[in-house]
Every structure is written in C-alpha cells, then in structure tokens.
Image (cartoon, helix red, strand yellow):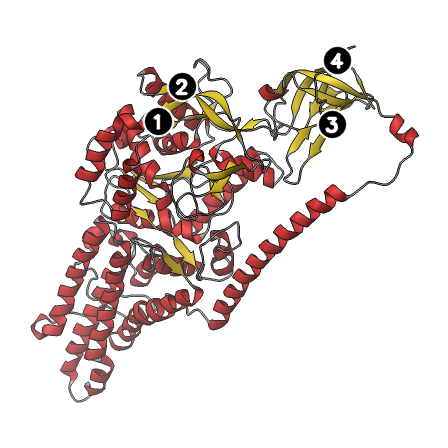
Amino acid sequence: MITSALPYANGPKHIGHLAGAYLPADIYVRYLRAKKEDVVYVCGSDEHGAAITIQAIKENTTPRAIVDKYHALLKSNMANLGISFDIYHRTSEPIHHQTAQEFFTALNDKGDLIQKETEQFYDEEAKSFLADRYIIGTCPVCGNENAYGDQCEKCGTSLSPDQLINPRSTLSGKAPSKKSTTHWFLPLDKHEGFLRDWILNQHKDDWKTNVLGQCKSWMDLGLQPRAVTRDLDWGVPLPPNVDGGKGKVLYVWFDAPIGYISATRQWAIDNNKDWKPYWQDKDTKLVHFIGKDNIVFHAIIFPVMLKLHGNILPDNVPSNEFMNLEGDKMSTSRGWSIEMDDYINDFVKKENGGDMMVDALRYYLTQIAPETKDSEFTWKGFQDAVNSELVSIFGNYVNRTFVLMHKLCKGKVPPLHETLLDDADKKIFADILETKNRIENLLETYKFRDALYEVIDLARKGNKYMQDKQPWIVAKTLDTNPDNQKLIDNCLHICLQLTANLTVLINPFLPFTAKKMCYMLKVVDKMLDWENAGKPKLLSVGYSLRAPELLFRKIEDEEVKQQVEKLNNKKMAMENAALKSADEKDATLATVKPEIQFDDFAKIDLKVATIISASKVEKADKLLKLEVDLGFEKRTIVSGIAMHFTPEEIVGKQVVVVANLAPRKMRGIESNGMILMAEDKSGKLHFVSPQTVIDAGSNVS
C-alpha cells in the first residue's frame, strides 16, 4: 500500500510538490509493478479545512466551487506528468465521509478519544472560532512573522496557535480572544512509550534521519492531547448520534489521512477487490511518501490512530526536504514558483513528443531530489541536465547504437561470436548485472537520486565501450579482412543488449522514454518486467529493429532566458497586484457616492429587527434564509452572508433591516427586506447593529 500526501485542493501545485511526495512514490510504484508485486498506489485531493474556505473567500466563491475547480486541475496535472495513481480520490466523496465518521465512532466508542472543554481562539469582531489556519503570528522557532497556527511554512515546524507570538486573526486582523468550547481529543501523551519504542528503536536503522530527528524533537517537547474536531461548517460532520457534536466537523488533519483508506475502498469497489488486506494484513507493507512538513502527522499522529483502530502501521515514511527555486523558497502565493500546469502548457502541450519533455522534468527533479537536504531548481541546471546527460549521454548512446546497427548490421540484431569475446566485452555484461543489483538495492532503500545516477552511468559506460571498439573504423577493414565483421557483430550485439537493459532500468524513472525505446526495439511492454533487468540476451539474434528516433531534444538558451524572465515577471505582477488591491480597498473605503437630497433618504424605512431563526438555502452556498422579528410582524429575508456566518451564531442577533424594499424571489424563496452590512478591507462582512438591545421594530434615522 503506497500513499502520497493528499494535496490541498485550494490552488495549483508547483514542481516542488511534485518532487517531494509524488514523483518519488511513482518511481517506487513503477518499480514494484515491474517486479509484479501486488501494489496499490492511492492519493486524492484534500478538500476540507481552513485552507479551502480561505481560498473561497479570496476568490469570492464557495468552498464547493473551489474544490471542484482545483481537484480537476490537480488530477489532470498529475496524469500529464506521468504520476500513475491507481486511484486519485477526493475527501468530499460520500464514501470518505462514511469512512471518516466510522473511524471516529470506533475510537470514540472504545474510549480512545477524550472530550473536554477548552479555551479556543475566537474573533470577537467576526464572531467566529478560529481554526489554526485562520491565525497567524510570529514563529517561535525562526521568527517568521506570518506563521500559521498549525505550522510555519518557512522553517517547517509544526505549531499550535498558543505557540505563536502576537497571534492575529486572518478574518479581521485583530488579536483574537479565548472562548470556551467543547471538543474531542486524541490523547497522544498516553502513547508516547509506544511511539518512542516503535520509531526510535524499531526503525532507527531504516527510517531517514530527518524523520527520526523531527519525531524525537516533537516527543522531547512532550506530547499533548490533540483536538480531532473543530467549530467549522466545512468538513466531515460528526456522526449525528454523537451528543454535543452538532455544528462540529472532524479536524482536517484527522480526516485527511483517513482519505487513504477511503480511496482504497473506492478503488476496491471499482475493481471488484477486497480493500481490507491492504490496511489490515500484517504482511502488507505500508509506505507513506511525504514532504517534511507532514512528518509529524504521518509518523506520530496517524500511526496512533491506525494502531487504535486495528490497522497496520507504516513500514516507512520516506520524507523529502524542500526544493527551492533560483535562490529563493518556492511559493505560489508570492509568484515565485513553477506550477505544474505552467510547465505542461509551456513544454508538453506545445510540441510533438511532449511526453519526452515530461521525462526531461522527471529526470531533473529526480537528479536534484531533496532527499537529505533542501535542493534548488534552476532553469540553467535543467538545461545542463537535459543537454549534457539525457541528450549527450543516454540519448546519444541509444541513437549511435541504432544508427550503427542499421548501417553495419543490416538493421538486425547481429549474432554474438562467443569465442571472440574479450575482457572489455565481458566487463560490459558484468556491468549490466551489477548495475541492476545496485539500482534494486537503492530503490528498496528509497535512494532514487542515486539509483537514477546508476542508469545514466551504465549508458556512459556503453558510450565508452563503443568509442573504444570503434566499429565504424573496423568497418573500413572489411574489404581486406571480412572476418572483422564478427568484431562489429559482437560490439553492436552487446550495445543492443545494453540498450534493452537500459529500457528496463529507466522505466520507473522515465516511463515515456522506456515506451518509446520499446517501440524502436519492436518489443512489447512485457519486456519492462524487472525480471528481465540484468539479462545478457533480451533481444533475439536476427530480429529487425526500427529506425532510430531521437529520444530527447536540447534545451536552447533562449528558452532558459524566457522562463527566467517569466518567473521574474510573475513575481513582480503578484507584488503589484497586492499593492493595487490594497490601494483599491483604501479607495473604496474613501469613496462617497453621488450627493442625494433628504427626500431621497427619507424614502428608505430602516428598522431594528431580531433574527429568530436561520438556515442554509439548499444548493446555494452563499445564502442564508433568515426569519426576523420586526416587532409588529415576522418576515423572511434571504441574505448572501453564508460565507461569513454560520446559522447558529447569528440567531438572537439584532440587525438593521431595509423594511420597505420590494419583495424579490431568490432560489424560490420570497425575500422581504435587506439586512444592512459593512465590509472591511479584507472583505469580511459585519452586521450594522445597535450598541445595546432595543425593541424590535425601532426606527433607525
């Protein structure tokens, strides 16, 4: 069972994300499939949590619209870049809600969760409890002034809101207060003994040092109970039979990893399989591929959940560090990133053979993979890797082999004259087998960068072997010494067998390249089975092969220049847009509408009303249906405030109503009036209300 961290469906993802959790997993999975292992690779969009609702507010739309938009984009991007999930699911699906609720119920019924009243951050102005992502402040570790309440994205430290220095609400910008609320918690402190033994003893020799180090640091600080529920209206609701669960949802860190299980369940339904062995069979190997910002969740918290629920524990949690870009941290919000979608549009969709440009990216990202420390993507580095290695070493070797085979061996695999084999010939056969064994050992220990190097190094050895043998020179002696054809045969036979082996070995890393090489070799994909790697006789003597085709093209200087300019222009545009937005908000607040006469104003009948009930309008994420008491009568008003307030928090609120506004039907409901609201610089709405409670129906003048 292989998983990659579920990406938030709140925006496009950049190539740093690809390098961190998805490409390494895909390489490993393709290797396992080639070995004919029973493997399932699951992932999907994480569609709950504050990140989604924050993006919805930014785009002036609904959370549902956000997740639908970005789920489709992420799924398409991953497929275009060759990430071969068995299923790419989503946490908004009913089967996930069911699975997550069942998981919660199982733990709660056994007493593995505790319920307690706590003081949570609360925005008095927004009248809302604040999820961790709605709180920013100064990171106590690195001093970043814009760290989130759950994590500092600059240094990667997992945090709680209480650890932030000078916390402030992202809704109002004000310092939040504390307010009592009741939630369910996972008591991690009760499981510290198990975690220390399991992580620091049982896995001390096979887990990466960055994973072990971060886990030890977290435990040394003292594990604390961690909330598994939140006061939000977007997420997986608590099961309806849970006392006190109304209006609460599962905290996203709790529901998201359960998404691996729900995705497996859906895959099993789609393929008429049984999902349970992949999560319950003790012989199943579970591996989580993640970035370092997810270590704590996958190596400490989720394993506790799995253990309590009776599931298997992860065998390994290969975590990568971060990938920077042209000397700075990659960040979509600052415009300093290469989005997967941008690369696809610029290099894959614009040209014939775009699949080869997919493999060019996969090659460079693997070559500079941040396996042990942060790495850096540069467009010049990308150009050098493609031109100097893929084109000049790997591609050049394959092309020369095919060209010479067609020129000197009539386009067929020549025979091998074993009595004429010399030490150099025998050394190449030995190198093929040794390379296969080294690659296998490296892949099994998640060292993908080193494994890829071995493939390229084998091609480099092939180039040297061919250059030393010089069959094109030997061919000039055939008129006087026809027997020298046997030397040419041996050289090109060995070069072709090495090419076939390169096809098998490169497949996990560069699948489109392997497919094209299979076409040139006129072999079926079955040759890519790992059992064929290292074999000296993959191609039959006398077999006709197709004409050579270039595997890769060079990256030109002008392309590098354009991409660097594009990157700088995007960053500048983002900065200018932020400044413009701030100026426009200031201008909007300062703008006064055209002058009116008193008689115009006197036509408006403003009255104080009390909201006596509120509910969401079906299939309209922005609308709330309100019943208000005007003192002399009760009215129904439909108001577009659902993105800013929950129904529960506004019942009993006194508001100002335009009482003589003509009725209007909205979603089939007749609305009789309008609630007055004020909008601040951040776009957050606030009620216009009397300072003290007064009689409903009082005139406002």
Tag 2 residue = 116
Q: Residue at 34% of width from left, 50% of height from top?
A: 321
Tag 1 residue = 225
The mark found on residue 676 in the picture is 3
Badge 2 marks a residue whose secondary structure is strand
Circles 2 and 1, Cβ within 8 Å, touching? The answer is yes
- Separation (CA) of disc 3 from disc 4: 18 Å
Q: Residue furthest front?
A: 166
Q: Amino acid at mark 4?
A: Asp
- Separation (CA) of disc 2 from disc 1: 10 Å
- Separation (CA) of disc 2 from disc 3: 38 Å
The mark found on residue 695 in the picture is 4
Q: Amino acid at mark 3?
A: Leu
Q: Mark 3 or 1, which is nearer the eye?
A: 1
- Please state which of residues 304 and 427 is positioned toward the viewer in this rendering: 304
Whether residue 543 is visible, yes or no, is: no
Whether residue 26 is visible, yes or no, is: yes
Q: Residue at 44% of width from left, 55% of height from top?
A: 329
Q: Residue at 45% of width from left, 38% of height from top?
A: 164
Q: Residue furthest top?
A: 632
